[in-house]
Image: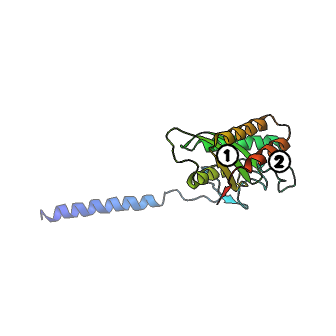
Amino acid sequence: MKKILPFILVLTLGAVLLTGCASNASTMPSPTPGATNMLEPLMPESTNNGLALGTTPGTAATGMPAATGEPLANGQQPTVEGTRQAAQAMEEAVEKLSEVDDAYVVPLGDTALVGVKFTTQYQSGTDDRLKKMVLTRVQTVDKAVTKVAVTENAAIVAGIQAASEALKGASSLDDVNTKAEELLRQLTVYSE
């Protein structure tokens, strides 16, 4: 009897616990029809031919006009302000790389000219790995950019910086595009 009593007590306790778990299962929250997830994704999923959800053709994932220098899908020309904002956002995105201290970006068609100044710790230069990382960062701003021309050459970086500064005060993209095309001829373009 002494051995049976603890055994029955353990069985009863186990049954009570399992019954309690089973009864709570019916009160668990269930998905409500029409309910939406309130969390925003970190990176918008890409549909619509590479455009972020909620954007229209010819606009960047940020909602600003694509900085392509070419007519947008809706037939409009890119604006100086939209290109300026995209270039600034691209510079900030590239500067987030741990290898990069300063970056200067000039969008030109489906290509972005990128001049970089590296941190003192980084010694590898502009290899394909870095170019791929730069392209990825630039594409977070504008998916229409499919190529980058990245350089660390001080003279060309200074030229890209001057073109970037000229873009900030430009009233038209013509002069900036002309400067950028001259610089682009001196560089090797990287694309995936």
Can residue 52 be seen from the camera position used here?
no
Q: Position of residue 59 (x, y in %)?
A: 77, 51
- Of labels 1 and 2, earlier in sequence is 2
**In-front residue for pair 50/147:** 147
Can residue 184 be seen from the camera position used here?
yes
User: Around disc 1, counting alpha carbons within 10 Å, would you say few (fewer than 14), some (14 to 19), or many (20 or more)?
Assistant: many
Find residue 178 and report its image quarter.
Answer: top right
The amino acid marked with disc number 2 is Pro
Question: Nearer the viewer's eye, disc 1 or disc 2?
Answer: 1
| Left or right of 25 on screen, residue 36 | right
**Which residue is disc 2 drawn over?**
78
Q: Which mark is residue 79?
A: none
Q: CA distance from mark 1 to mark 2?
A: 20 Å
| Left or right of 73 on screen, residue 99 | left
**Which residue is disc 1 drawn over?**
114
**In-front residue for pair 7/49:** 49
User: Around disc 2, counting alpha carbons within 10 Å, would you say few (fewer than 14), some (14 to 19), or many (20 or more)?
Assistant: many
Residue at position x 57%, y 59% in the image: 31
| Left or right of 98 on screen, residue 73 | right
Find residue 14 and report its image quarter.
Answer: bottom left
The amino acid marked with disc number 1 is Val
Q: Quadrant of the C terminus?
A: bottom right
Secondary structure beneath label 1: strand
**In-front residue for pair 98/126:** 126
Decide: is 39 above or below 155.
Answer: below
